[in-house]
Image (cartoon, rainbow, N blue to C red):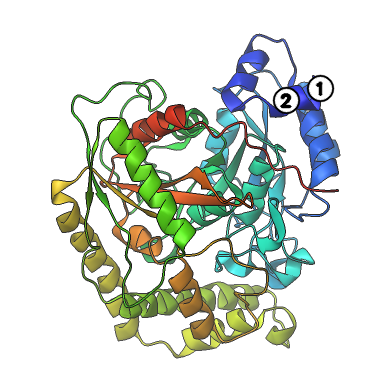
Amino acid sequence: MRTDEYESRDGLALAALLHKREVSPAELLDCALQIADDRNGALNALCYLRPEAAMAMARAAQPKGVFGGLPFLLKDSGLASTFLPSSVGSRLFAGMTFASDATLQTRFLADGFLAFGRTTVPEFCMAPTTEAVQNGGPTRNPWDPRRSSGGSSGGAAVAVATGIVPIAHGSDGGGSIRIPASCCGVYGLKPSRGLVPHGPLRGEGWGGLAVDGVLTRTVRDTAAALDGIAGMEPGQPYSAPERPASYLARLNLPFKRPLRIARWTESWEGIGIAPECRKAVMLTGELLAGLGHEVVDVAPPPLKYAAFIGAIIDVMSANVALTVNGWLRQKPVDDLSSVLEPAILDAWHRGQRLGAEAYALAINRFHAIGRTMADHMAGFDIVLTPTLTQLPALLGALSMAEDFETFRRKAGRYTAFLAIINASGQPAASLPLHWTEEGLPVGVQMVGHFGAEDMLLRLSAQLEAAAPWQGRYARPAA
């Protein structure tokens, strides 16, 4: 198979060829490696590549699962894989290995995904941009290399946007799938809390904020991937509502009635929204109305946004302290400033000082957001918002070189519509429906009721059919 044939197909189309044995896993991996070699150098999206070992696996692989042996990339988020080490974007953890696979990795393998490397992240996945010192430089936006690819799944979004793989693993604790999806012009869905397992070594991430999923070029690839990875595992602390037998099988079912959609064009506490981001939401509302749905402009529900960001800072700091201290008990480090970036080092100090009452209050603030959003959406099926409040950030604009609180409050203004949905636990997707005259993608976010991935995916598919985006591929200069 030629590389242009490979990159013109989505994951399911390639999987169909694999199952018919018209192409082999090794041939597809060869295409992925060629494209990676051509396009990754200037963008810095990949790490921990194991091409020779992966090729040996691909040559021995028999088609299985829905995806049959499709080239794939795991995010460098610490998702346990016996095949791939991880650093979580940190010099402290560089080359960390695992004795067993995470439940999610086991499901990826069973569904026919063959990972040949990982994708870059910011340190500890705690930034909306991917510029970790561990990566040796920033991960650049394939549409404008002066700008960020987003974060924390920045490398994954670049890999999908440039055609290296049609589907890549991502995770989202405050927008980390949706931010890079918006910045890089791909589709990214954050599942409901409890739908995709975290185990077996842990039950949650960041007080319930974090979830895993994928980034793709087509809605149907996301639906098919979710079919394979969703579902409870024994002992997990959260449970999503009952799901359909197959999201993919229901993807093109018509709605029995027009959906009622709340559109937000303002934020909280004076946070500004760039004209292009507001324009994207307005145009998407017109597109939805043209599809027969009812779009209603409403104000976001009242909430103390600055206090909410403070809660995120506390929970993240506590988790930095937990993670770093656990590692130091095994492998002491004399000078943490030599292996942690300034913002994360400050978060570690903050976490050391954080009291139990402050942590409990932060969790309560998260839970309050869930109740607020449930009340707000009582009369609506979907909420439509900008994904980001601004165009993709210029590299260096959101820097880990400052203290953690300052850094996270800047990030909170950039991602005002995202982390609240991590707190509420609802599903949300960023759709690449708008592009500036200069060729920059601008995502729009759709939020569904808790457990309502089915509705969100079906509406996404309607929009994809009405305004197709799959043919847009980033072609960065070598």
Q: Are marks 2 and 1 in contact (CB under 8 Å)?
A: yes
Q: Residue at x 80, y 45 (%)?
A: 39
Mark 2 belongs to which amino acid? Tyr
Q: Residue at x 56, y 43 (%)?
A: 186
Q: Residue at x 39, y 42 (%)?
A: 233
Q: Is residue 427 above or below residue 301?
A: above
Asked if residue 420 lies left or right of residue 200, the reply is: left
Asked if residue 254 lies left or right of residue 328, the reply is: left
CA gap between label 2 and label 1 equals 6 Å
Residue 208 x %, y % = 37, 61
Q: Nearer the viewer, residue 60 or 75?
A: 75
Q: Residue at x 64, y 60 (%)?
A: 121
Q: Is residue 410 above or below residue 293?
A: below
Question: What residue does disc 2 label?
Answer: 6
Mark 1 belongs to which amino acid? Arg
Which residue is at the far bottom? 353
The answer to which image quadrant residue 217 occupies is: top right
Residue 113 x %, y % = 62, 32
Element on which disc 1 rests: loop
Asked if residue 156 lies left or right of residue 360, the reply is: right
| Numbered tag placed on residue 431 in the rendering | none
Question: What residue does disc 1 label?
Answer: 2
Element on which disc 2 rests: helix
Q: How many marks?
A: 2
The answer to whether residue 92 shows anywhere in this view is yes
